[in-house]
Each structure stands twice: as structure tokens, then as C-alpha cells.
Amino acid sequence: MTCRRRPSVAAVLALLFAQAAEAAPTTRDQFVTDHLCAVRTRLTRIHQRGPHDTSRNRFLVVAIRGDPQSYVQCIFTDEDRTMLCEASSGVYRDRDDAGIRRHLRPDAVSALHRLGFSQPDPKRNFQRTVDLGMPPDLDIPARLILTALYDAYDGAGAQALDMHAPMAGGEPACGVASADRSETMRTM
């Protein structure tokens, strides 16, 4: 007589919950998804409008609204084969920003390092060069910008993002809480 063992209900439920947790998007994934269209669309417009032989005004700055020291900015370089991206270190804050932190928390610096940013000079921002390939894959810098904002600058609590890109045109039809700003941001 053979007695087959049935898995316990608790074991089956534990397995199902573990699989659901793996499949469920994280809050970081949701943040990136919520803002990806707006960032990628602006980068695409900048790329399409050229000229590709210069970097002048061919940049995008994305900041967490209400915190001008929480930004990532990227500029097209090398005829659009690469982008130079900078993440705020806080050293360029305006003198009027007395209440804003000047230096990042150690966990924020670690997050930027994990994303490939480095800070060769402590008096400058964190930097990273992003290879875009040919044709340029603008999803790469768009995701980097948003992941850095989430991981290093408390993006989880962001109500909206401010974006500045002189060559990107108006607001894309993406349905996200962002502002296209034509004036120069104080954080640049």
C-alpha cells in the first residue's frame, strides 16, 4: 500500500505568495514606468532635432519637484553615440537654498555608485558616460535618470518631476505629473 503525501495548504500558499512577490512590480519599477514616457519622449525629441555634431542645448534635466538638489541631467555627446549624465552632489546649490542638504547621505552615494556614477572631484557632481549604441537606444539614459532619482533622491516620495530641456518642445502626451520648464533651473 502506497501512501502519497499531499503538500500542505500552508506550503502551497507560501509558494504562491513567493511567486506573486517575485512577479509583482516594485515601487521603483512603478516609478520608472510612470515617468518613462515623459523622459524618453524628451530625449527622442532632442535627438531628432539635432544637430548631432554639437552638444549645445541638447540636454535634459529631471528633478524631484520641491527639491532642487535632487536632479539628474544628461547631455548628448559624440554625435549622439553617448550621453554624459550627472547626478547632483549638492555642491552647486544656490546660496539661498539654506535649508537644502549640501551633501548626500552615504546610502544615496552608494546607490549612485551601484548605477555606475563616480565623483572624481568632490567639488563637482557625480558623473557617468552612457553608451547609446547606433541607432541610439534612449531607453538606457531614461531608465538611468529615473532609477537614480528613485534610489538616491527619495523618488518614492516624489509627487511630481520637473523637467528642463530647451530642445524638447512641449509637454509629451504621457499622462504623468511632470512640468516642462522653459526657464533655466537654479540647480544647473
Image: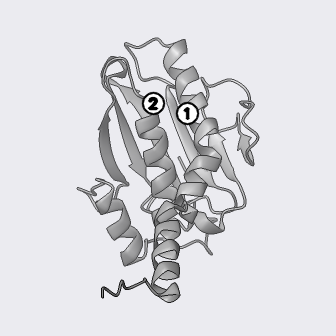
Image quadrant assignment for residue 108: bottom left
On-image quarter of the N terminus: bottom left
Residue 57: x percent and y percent? 52, 26
Above or below residue 49? Residue 123 is below
How packed is label 1: few (under 14 Cα within 10 Å), some, or many (20 or more)? some
Q: Which residue is mark 2?
A: 138
Instruction: Between residue 65 and residue 132, name the one nearer to us.
Output: 132
Query: What crowding class fits label 2: few (fewer than 14 Cα within 10 Å), some (14-19), or many (20 or more)?
Result: some
Cα separation, mark 1 vs mark 2, equals: 6 Å
Q: Is residue 185 left or right of residue 13?
A: right
- Provide residue 143's location: percent of width, then percent of height: 47, 45
Q: Residue at x 66, y 63 (%)?
A: 158
User: What amino acid type is highlighted by mark number 1?
Assistant: Arg
Q: Secondary structure at mark 1?
A: helix
| Residue in the picture at 42% in, 61% down | 89
Badge 2 marks a residue whose secondary structure is loop
- Of residues 45 and 13, which is closer to you in this image? 13
Q: Nearer the viewer, residue 91 or 162?
A: 162
Tell me if label 1 and label 2 are in contact, CB under 8 Å: yes
Query: For mark 1, what is the residue?
Result: 40
Residue that appears at 72% across and 36% down: 174
